[in-house]
Image (cartoon, coloured by chain):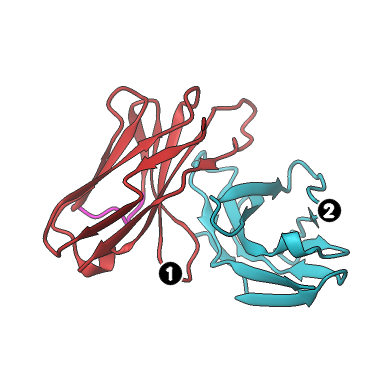
Amino acid sequence: DTGVSQDPRHKITKRGQNVTFRCDPISEHNRLYWYRQTLGQGPEFLTYFQNEAQLEKSRLLSDRFSAERPKGSFSTLEIQRTEQGDSAMYLCASSQRTSGGVADTQYFGPGTRLTVL
Amino acid sequence: AQRVTQPEKLLSVFKGAPVELKCNYSYSGSPELFWYVQYSRQRLQLLLRHISRESIKGFTADLNKGETSFHLKKPFAQEEDSAMYYCALRGMDTGRRALTFGSGTRLQVQP
């Protein structure tokens, strides 16, 4: 499977614990995105990387959240001191930069479902 | 600020009936609109975008800037069209890459 992969697919943790998710984008894609989706809602943007540079961050990304893409390939999203409100599906997407200002197609991964008890 | 509204959480039609999934947006600049689809147990995927002006799987969508709408239409629904559909927006004039999604509409096509 050459699509976007995410690990783990499911994570159950206790409130106050730290969790880390990994995203592996499609190999030639230089752009990587994180979104969060709660029940009954569409995905909400969290952050965006072009290569290793984090170029956009949503106000949803509180101080407890941090994302990295150290070598411009895979990315990690860490949530510190998890809260019950962090329970959601965390989606990763990747795309390849195009010219002309037209939005490139974002390809989504299967997501990591986080449950905070 | 950007906002996408999908007023219907569920749309149920019979096979062969026309389908229209509504999407309204709020954005003061130049928008780029998309429809994404999620079939059961599959990942979210792009269905179509307004710039391409193409028909995918029989679906079309026209950007109406006057009504700030981007409704998704298909003249004859098929059972395999049953899925979750999300409308999304990006501000072309901002340089930002983030997509703003609506809350989605579940389409059920009954036999």
Q: How many residues crowd mark 1 within 10 Å: few (<14), some (14–19), many (20+)? A: few
- Quadrant showing the C terminus of chain B: bottom right
Please indicate, yes or no, whether residue A62 appears anywhere in the rendered image: yes
Residue sitting nearer the eye, B98 or B76: B76
Compared across the picture, whether A49 is left or right of A63 comes to right
Q: Give the amino acid at mark 2.
A: Gly
Check disc 1 and report the residue beneath it.
A39
Identify the image quadrant of residue B40: bottom right
- Tell me residue B77's x, y (percent): 82, 65
The answer to whether residue A92 is above or below residue A64 is above
Compared across the picture, whether A17 is left or right of A66 comes to left
Check disc 2 and report the residue beneath it.
B58
- Reply yes or no: does residue B85 show up in magenta: no
Q: Which chain is red?
A: A
Per the image, label 2 sits on a secondary structure element best described as: loop
Compared across the picture, whether B82 is left or right of A91 comes to right
Q: Colour of chain B?
A: cyan
- Tell me residue B109's x, y (percent): 74, 71
Q: How many residues crowd mark 2 within 10 Å: few (<14), some (14–19), many (20+)? A: few
Q: Which residues are magenta?
A: A58-63
Q: Give the amino acid at mark 1.
A: Leu
Compared across the picture, whether B28 is left or right of A3 comes to right
Mark 1 vs mark 2, CA separation in Å: 29 Å
- Tell me residue B16's x, y (percent): 88, 69
